[in-house]
Structures are given as C-alpha cells and as structure tokens.
C-alpha cells in the first residue's frame, strides 16, 4: 500500500477517535447524570506499550460510557548500577513491575483491567481482563454502545469477520515488527521485514473492499483498526534504526486476500 495513503488513513482514524470521543461524552453527559454510574476499571498500563495503547484507544472511543483509572504498572528506573551491569560505573535502567499486576494476572502483562465496584469504589479482583485484543472487545461490549459506535459489530457475521482480521493483523502486521528491531543478523531482520510487508499488502487488499479509511464500511472504527494503529505509528523507526532498505515501500496492495 502507498505509505502516504496508509498514514493518511491512520491520521483520519485518530481524528475520528477524537471526534467520536467528544460526541460520545457530550451525548452521554446527560444520561450519565441520571444513571450516575458507568462501568469503571483500574487500568494497569505502561506509557510506552503499544499493546496497552490498544486498550487506551478503546477506552477513549467509549469515553462517557466507560471510566478508567490509569495505573503505571511496569517500566524501567534509572538507578545507580550497584551490581555493575555496565562495568562503567554509569547508571543503569532496572525493570520494575507492580505487585498488583503480578497478583491479578499470572502472565503479568499490560494491559490488564480490574473491575471497580461502582457502589463501593473497591476493586473486584475476581473480575480481571487482559490480552489487548480481548480488552478491546470487552471494553466495547461493556460500554453498552450500539450501532456505529460499536468497535465490534452487533451483526454476528461482521463481528466474526472483524475478530478474524484483528487476529490476522496482529500476527502479520504487528508481531514481525519486533524481529526487524531485535534480531542480530541482517538476513533475519530482512525476513521479518518481508513478512510484515506481505501482511500489510494483504490487509491493504482487504481495505480496498470498503470505502475506507477504516476496516469496516462507511468509516466505522473497529477493533481491527485499533489493533494496527499503535504499530502504524511506530513503523517510521525502521528507517532510523535499520536504514533506507527498511522503509515501507510506496507500492500498492499486490494480492487481495485469498
Ligand atoms: N499478548 C499480550 C502482550 C502484552 C505485552 O507483551 N505487554 C508488555 C509491555 S509492551 C508487557 O507487559 N511486558 C511485561 C514486562 O515488561 O515485564 C497482549 O496482546 O496484551
């Protein structure tokens, strides 16, 4: 797919999220005053994490319908290198993770959502949701939104199709990103990069079936878009770290999905 068009699509999607959030908050403000309570979650997250950003986008899309408290649950702290990891005496980044995250989710990954009881405002650790694709789906369902506000269609056929494509985009357009950056050998990096390009081309072929810029028809934002967006915003780093041979080419989709 043409890279510029692709980024335009991503930008349009972000504009839609902002617009949708603002319309949703206004439209639901009156209702929320009457109803008083929305589903609410403690959102264990990390500022840099693209998986968590998927959940953030879903929360923001449903702003005014679902509430969340952002909790920074893991990261790196710059500290004195007491165990001499660097051997230079310089400070070193140490990984940390909150006890709450390791307690509620055995895989200890962000995003992780913990339900907050709307009456007592206490967390209910028997209600924990994790895995970014599941989080998007869950936030969408619990929002109570209907029609075009839904990220996963109420139509079972479209819902199934979107879930298949969300998984496919995750595996083919997001996962290979890490191989390009962390693999040591150039031929391995190239292999992951080619895999990624093929994934983008296939997805681009699928996007051509609708009016775009979103996966669903008529510009409806969906789980599939939310899966890709955090990675789409990071693709530019390939050129910075891997050079001009790793720029996503400005070619159009080659093969439609079989
Ligand atoms: N399959 C998970 C992957 C989530 C993931 O890998 N998150 C990273 C942060 S970007 C994490 O929690 N890493 C654990 C750690 O840093 O200790 C999902 O889709 O939610």
Image (tube, grey):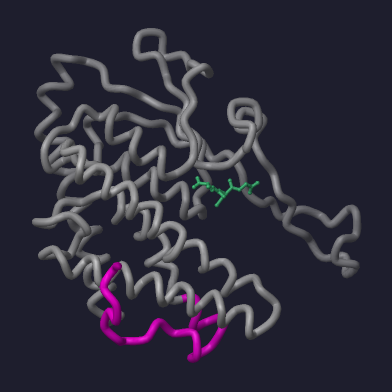
Reply above or below: 257 against 67.
Answer: below
Q: Nearer the viewer, residue 220 or 205?
A: 205
The residue lying at 46 percent from left, 30 percent from top is 129
The residue lying at 35 percent from left, 8 percent from top is 119
Residue 143, quarter of the rendered image:
top left
- The region drawn magenta spans 237-258
In the rendered image, which quarter contains the C terminus? Answer: bottom left
Give the x, y percent position of residue 237: 49, 75
Residue 145, quarter of the rendered image:
top left
Q: Nearer the viewer, residue 69 or 115?
A: 115
In the image: residue 1, left or right of residue 46: left
Judged from this view, the residue extending furthest toward the front is 258
The residue lying at 47 percent from left, 20 percent from top is 127
Judged from this view, the residue extending furthest toward the top is 120
Reply above or below: 131 against 94.
Answer: above
In the rendered image, which quarter contains the N terminus? Answer: bottom left
The residue lying at 45 percent from left, 28 percent from top is 42
Give the x, y percent position of residue 118: 35, 14
Judged from this view, the residue extending furthest toward the bottom is 244
In the image: residue 134, left or right of residue 252: right
């Amino acid at each position: 797919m043409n890279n510029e068009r692709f980024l335009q699509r991503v930008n349009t999607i972000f504009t839609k999220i902002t617009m949708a959030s603002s319309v949703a908050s206004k439209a639901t403000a009156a209702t929320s005053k009457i109803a008083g309570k929305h589903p609410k979650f403690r959102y264990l997250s990390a500022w840099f994490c693209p998986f968590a950003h998927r959940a953030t986008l879903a929360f923001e899309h449903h702003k005014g319908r679902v509430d969340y408290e952002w909790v920074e649950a893991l990261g790196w702290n710059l500290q004195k290198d007491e165990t001499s990891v660097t051997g230079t005496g310089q400070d070193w980044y140490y990984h940390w993770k909150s006890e709450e995250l390791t307690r509620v989710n055995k895989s200890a990954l962000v995003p992780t959502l913990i339900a907050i009881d709307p009456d007592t405002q206490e967390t209910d650790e028997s209600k924990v949701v994790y895995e970014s694709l599941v989080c998007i789906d869950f936030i969408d369902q619990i929002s109570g939104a209907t029609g075009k506000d839904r990220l996963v269609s109420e139509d079972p056929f479209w819902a199934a199709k979107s879930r298949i494509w969300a998984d496919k985009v995750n595996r083919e357009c997001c996962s290979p990103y890490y191989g390009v950056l962390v693999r040591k050998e150039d031929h391995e990096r190239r292999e992951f990069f080619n895999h990624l390009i093929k994934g983008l081309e296939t997805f681009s072929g699928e996007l051509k079936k609708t009016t775009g810029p979103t996966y669903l028809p008529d510009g409806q934002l969906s789980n599939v878009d939310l899966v890709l967006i955090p990675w789409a915003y990071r693709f530019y780093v390939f050129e910075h770290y891997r050079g001009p041979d790793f720029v996503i080419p400005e070619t159009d989709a080659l093969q439609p999905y079989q």
